[in-house]
Amino acid sequence: MDAFTQAGKTAVMQNIHGTMQFLQRFPPFNQMENAHLAYLVEQCQLRFYAADESIIKPADGPVEHFYIVKQGRVVGERTHVVKGGTETTFEITCGECFPLAALLGERATRTEHLAAEDTFCLQLNKAAFIRLFALSEAFRDFALRGVSSLLDQVNQQVQRRAVETLGNQYSLNTRLGELAMRHPVVCSPDTSVREAVGLMHEQQVGSIVIVDPQRAPLGIFTLRDLRQVVADSSTDFAAPIAAHMTAKPFHLSPQHSAFDAAIAMTERHIAHVCLVEDQRLCGVVSERDLFSLQRVDLVHLARTIRHAPRVEQLVALRGEIGQLVERMLAHGASSTQITHIITLLNDHTVCRVIELAIQDKGDPGVPFSWLCFGSEGRREQTLHTDQDNGILFEARDAAHAAEIRGRLLPLAQHINQGLAQCGFSLCKGNIMAGNPELCLSRAEWARRFAAFIREATPENLLASSIYFDLRVVWGEEQACEQLRHSILQQVADNRLFQRMMADNALRQRPPVGRFREFVLTRQGNDKAATLDLKVQGLTPFVDGARLLALANGISANNTLERLRELVNREVIDPLDGGAYEEAYQFIQQTRMQQHQLQTRQNQPYSNRVDPDSLNDLDRRILRESLRQAQRLQSSLALRYQL
């Protein structure tokens, strides 16, 4: 009897150990303490479900068990409100669990969970789930945040890999209050220029802030201002500093991040940011403070680009952007921050190419604005980008517009060639300012956009998906804003056009199928089947957010800004909006990591990825991210009865 008992105990222990080893391959179980994981395994029962057998369904009432797939696959089936019948909304495979939201909400599941094939699940009763939820911080974090907690793991991996290459410094997410000088050098408005400069020299700083008696900043005087003062031979150094300060200096709070300050300095061409709390100056952060420790020289690179004397130097500087992206990854920057920075540096490059072209070809004598469309218009560019641009100008009538166009086109074509030298590929579809059809007066652009909306042909729908994400990179912005306002009004008033845009947004289906994890295809001579991260992964979010933003009068161009504003206006649910945002960011990050790898290996850029090349965690989150794209498309189909 004792021998049998001992053998039984040994078998049980081996089974527990084997199940723990299995679970430790998957998040969040790989993050849990051994004692907590052992408790989970001890409380579980192994259940078998035959193919097509229902595991849980809405009619069962409040969920009583937590499930982990040990072998096989589980699919979620939901009734299609419009078309009738059922549709598969998700697929769950080995190491994944369900149904967290229903358990936490103490409600029935909204989706029937079916075994897609013969399937074994570990089943944990509700009482043990609640106990485990209280015991394990890692499990609780995952249960409450789902994919967000997995993304944290991915971001930590990315940062760890980059730090191994570049060395660790403080994070771009560091609060400015931790970086700023604790006692900034200040003076009153009536302090003389000589005295103010003396204070700067004495304290060895590059700026002095002019404050009122309540210590609110009125202005700032920097070494750049000092150079202008010295260059002016008529300057009276006994005059008040107020006459030479930059009034109403830009400021942030101490809670803002180093990244916020970096972007502000780059966009505004400034080297100092005041920190203000409760309307009182509490610090100053300089370019040197921000980047000498990090070696992330964004502001310096931007300034060098803006003052490059020749296109050839711009070409050389463009190579530094890839290195900058590596450093940003090492300091914890997100994919959204990095695409923002790439777009910002691209904008500076475009502006400088335009200025150099005008120097080279001569001023055309008419004011114009340089427009960008597509990903640059949305501020979502990666290292791999082509040109999508146009020109906007004012004209009295058609004849005047034709005359101006004749003067601008040679310059525009010269600019397009200069940008091509800098790595912005010439657009194969000729969506470039050097094309006479894209060098138009405001009235001509307005007529063209109205035709897109009025005549919703496939060609016009495709064009609207490019041109409706427009913004000005160089020149006056007012005319462009008028065009954007007109587009919003016309789309909001045209339900048929919205419906056709929705139909168009459903054409690129995320590559997640019912019977396998990913739906892959071969392209050209590729040996491995792959999926396209841009077209199949990002485009559903971009198109969906654009449609809903235009339909609801939202002027934001950026996809994530559109999603957040749609949540604010209660067009989409906050939980859905958060899930879409996280999924979009993960796919973009995966794409950027691939571009970085291709750069290091001197390979051509490609958006196609073989999921088998990803680790288990990345594969799982990519699959979940693509499912979120499916969910967004399903919501559009329901909203527009497609």
Image (tube, helix red, strand yellow):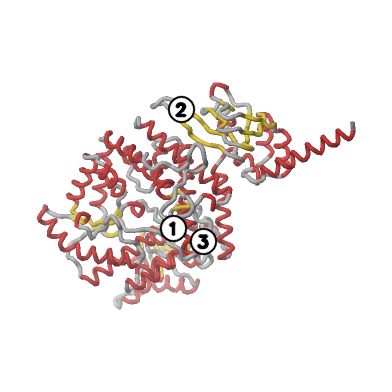
Amino acid type, callout 1:
Pro
Rendering coords of residue 137 (x, y %): 65, 42
Q: Which mark is residue 180?
A: 3
Indicate which disc, 1 or 2, sits on the residue closer to the N terminus: 2
Res 170 quadrant in image: bottom right
Q: Residue at x 17, y 65 (%)?
A: 365
**How would you rate the neighbour count of disc 2 (Cα within 10 Å): few for under 14, some for 14-19, many for 20 or more?**
few
Q: Nearest the camera: 368 or 378?
A: 378
In this rendering, the answer to whether 158 lies above or below 75 is below
Marks 2 and 3: in contact by CB < 8 Å?
no
Q: SS class of the residue under badge 3?
A: loop
**How would you rate the neighbour count of disc 3 (Cα within 10 Å): few for under 14, some for 14-19, many for 20 or more?**
many
Rendering coords of residue 246 (x, y %): 36, 63
- Residue found farthest to the left: 399
Amino acid type, callout 2:
Thr
Position of 563 with respect to 156 (left or right) is: left
Task: Give the number of the mark in front: 3 or 1.
Answer: 3
Q: SS class of the residue under badge 1?
A: loop
Rendering coords of residue 72 (x, y %): 60, 36
> Real-space Cα distance between discs 1 and 2?
70 Å
Indicate which disc, 3 or 1, sits on the residue closer to the N terminus: 3
Res 399 quadrant in image: bottom left
Task: Give the number of the mark in front: 1 or 2.
Answer: 2
Marks 2 and 1: in contact by CB < 8 Å?
no
Q: SS class of the residue under badge 2?
A: strand
Amino acid type, callout 3:
Ala
> Real-space Cα distance between discs 3 and 1?
22 Å
* Location of mark 2 (residue): 86
Rendering coords of residue 567 (x, y %): 42, 38
Q: Quadrant of the N terminus?
A: top right
* Location of mark 1 (residue): 213
